[in-house]
Amino acid sequence: MRYIELSAAVDPACAEAAADVLRAVTGAGVAIEAPFSQPDLDAAAVPSADGAALVRAYVAAGAGSAALARTVASALRAAGIRAEVTAGAVDEEDWAEAWKEHFHVERFGRLVVVPSWRAYEASPGDVVLTLDPGMAFGTGQHETTRMCLEALGRCVRPGARVLDAGCGSGILAIAAAKLGAVNVRAVDIDPDCVRITGENARANGVDACVRAGLTRLGDAAWAPAGKFDVVVANIIAATIIDLAPALVGALAADGRLVASGIIAAREPEVCAALVGAGARIVDVRAMGDWRCVEAVRADGVA
């Protein structure tokens, strides 16, 4: 299948706002790639203070793709975002291959994320997660995913029940299972994400406890009340705000919510929405311009 890759190069501080624009115009999933440097290809990538963030969306190829790029550029200008927008046709296979150049072994405490095409010799105590992102988003290189993985390493206990809202590649759901969770529900609005999460769960031998499902986030069935010990949502601030009642409501009495994908400027709005939904904020972690908010139920026992 062929896709049109729409790419907007923007100031990193505007990346989330640009992602909202691309998502609204295209109706497609959006990836934000922060600027990174990696002088040694055998070392981990590190955030760079220089360069633009790339915000990408992929839509099925067809007539009108050039007009769609113009529409995206116009919508970004209307939102006050300076951007260089490009469009090009890619095959599904080419899109997946393009990730491999920049995707390397990454460590997050005990968790080690290993691309499926790279070799890694595990050390004692390593919790190894093998990942192939395919057409989904979530590799561990972005600050938001890094903070979520670190949070899961602290929060997930053996036997835990975990909800991953907006599962992408499945990296967080699989990490939770590797850390000892026995019941992991992974949901997304993108069928590619659901498929790839299932494939990655099988590749990691955790498909018995990771259940991936296609759903419109916000539907009552996707987050049963009071069920989960950990709820992780690495999405965007606007969606977290909209889903705050469902995310908080899904927590068990002693459960913890890990919410990321939040640009610094929107942290107060997200925290206010969660508190309004019945949560108590217990931690806010920062990495660059991004924030990861951890919360518990205000009426809970945590």
Image (spheres, rainbow, N blue to C red):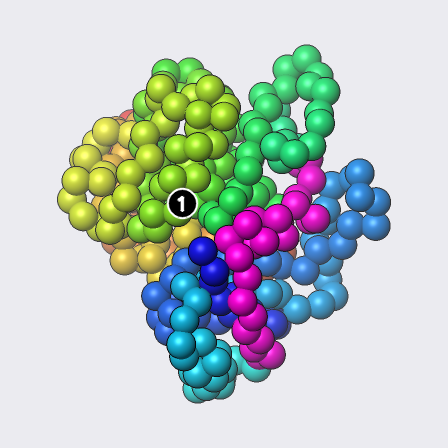
Q: Is residue 253 left or right of residue 147?
A: left
Q: Residue furthest right?
A: 40
Q: Quadrant of residue 139?
A: top right
In this picture, residue 86 sits left or right of residue 283:
right
Q: Is residue 272 visible?
A: no
Q: Residue at x 44, y 83 (%)?
A: 67
Q: Is residue 282 above or below residue 177?
A: below
Residue 112: % across, % down: 63, 29
Between residue 86 and residue 241, name the one nearer to us. Answer: 86
Residue 123: in magenta span:
no
Q: Quadrant of the C terminus?
A: top left
Do we see residue 118 in this rendering?
yes
Q: Quadrant of residue 222?
A: top left
In the rendered image, the quadrant that contains the N terminus is bottom left
Magenta region: which residues? 83-106
Towards the viewer: 39 or 296: 39
Q: Residue at x 69, y 49 (%)?
A: 102
Q: Secondary structure at mark 1?
A: helix
Q: Residue furthest left?
A: 220
Instruction: Using the image as rendered, state which of residue 93 and residue 43 is in the foreground.
Output: 93
In percent of the image, x 53 and y 57: which residue is there? 91
What residue would you read off at disc 1?
193
